[in-house]
Amino acid sequence: MLSMIGLIGGLALLIILTMRGMNLLVAGPLCALVVAVLSGMPLFPQMVGEGEANFVGNYMAGFSGFVASWFPMFLLGAIFGKVMEDSGAADSVSKWVVEKLGIKQAVLAIVIACAILTYGGVSLFVVAFSVYPMAVSLFKQADLPRRFIPAALAFGSVTFTMTSAGSPEIQNWIPIEYMNTSPYAGWEVSLIVAVFMAVFGYWWLKRMINKALDKGERFESRKGDPEVENRPLPNPFMGLIPLVVVLVISFIFHDSLKQSALIIALLGGVVTTYLLNRKYFSNFGLAVSDGTLGALIAIANTAAVVGFGGVAKAVPAFETAVDIMTSIPGSPLIGGAIAVSVIAGLTGSASGGQAIALPILAPHYMDMGVNAEALHRTVAISSGALDSLPHNGYVVTTIRAICGESHSDAYGAVGALTVIVPLIGLALAIILFSLGFGV
């Protein structure tokens, strides 16, 4: 009983501290310590026999294990995003989409621009920073309430693209290691779910905006609003080619190299961006340096959460919780989806939720004979639902740091589109897989 209190209390404390702005590198181990102490776990390796559970050993094993497995992907992904940003390639693609669709389709233009960049492998944070100035300009010209800008950015980035089949985003690649699948696992169902989420989510976003307009809300300019830079930009097709290169290389090598194919794909994207757009760079070396620093921060924050999971999964309460979730009646996919989604939600990280849950859940379900492709796609989609609760790093950064909004004004729309829409999409995926579609 005390162990369960410690587990739930530690997770709740992690959410509270994160929402209050505490650094995850501090909050992660602190909350893991709460779990360990209330579960009676020894604190140091010297206090137990070799291989036995202890706070420091389990936390650092989870932390270092995640870094060892995923640092090359985080590094190259962050560098690719930065060189796309610094060369103007990301801006060029976004601007091209906006110009083609026009002011009347301002919201759709922002969503599509984010979707193209995200599905092409550009970091979610880079996408938000890159598209935001154009979003402000479009919302201003269309006289739309600016509090919906974070929702438009998030919807195009972390819903129907991030966890879909073929996506180079890490949330689609982590399951490969545990299920021996490919990034295209369950693509038939993934396509249906992605189209549903895109159409339904866009309809809902437009409905929310129209209701706000009916109430008299309009765009409010602010001092210091960003301007869309008029610097020379590469041809938009020169910006699209690196995105295509990432997708093509990952497709070619995914069978032979599994998740390591992402390393070659992202490296190919970096090289292609440089070769095609080198005369447009402001400072290529600085872009690589900034990308490297961003990768270190991103993987450290995620690893801090995974380290917390390394302690949590070693206490008795965690095994009890897993038994409950994996014993849910009906399709085994339901238990897996709930487990990953809940852990991702409590930790505020889709990739962290997968890294904590899959080492335990994947062997369990694979031994039961669950279809690996169905499980891969279900887990990927489920990780991108509850992870977008208010304490999620991307949500906090996008709403506050990038858009300058408050959670009270902007999160309602963000939560609807990045939590509820993916949950409905997840339910649709489970139903389709349970009916035998795509397996």
Image (cartoon, grey):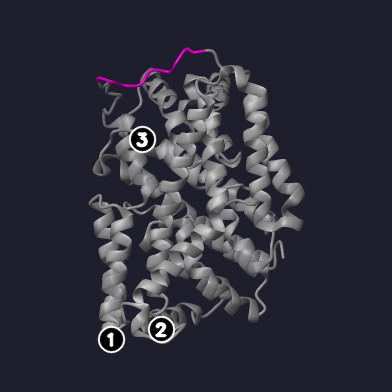
Q: Which amino acid does the dot numbered 3 rest on?
A: Phe
Mark before the other along the chain sequence, 2 or 1: 1
Q: Is residue 224 magenta?
A: yes
- The crowd level at tag 2 (other Cα within 10 Å; few <14, some 14-19, many 20+) is few
Q: Which residues are magenta?
A: 223-231
Q: Which residue is mark 2?
A: 320
Helix, strand or loop at mark 1: loop
| CA gap, disc 2 and disc 1 | 11 Å
Mark before the other along the chain sequence, 3 or 1: 1
Q: Which residue is mark 1?
A: 1
Quarter of the image for the C terminus: give it.
bottom right
Q: Which residue is mark 3?
A: 148
Q: Nearer the viewer, mark 3 or mark 1?
A: 1
- Residue 399 visible (yes or no): yes
Q: Quadrant of residue 122?
A: top right
Q: Is residue 216 above or below residue 40?
A: above
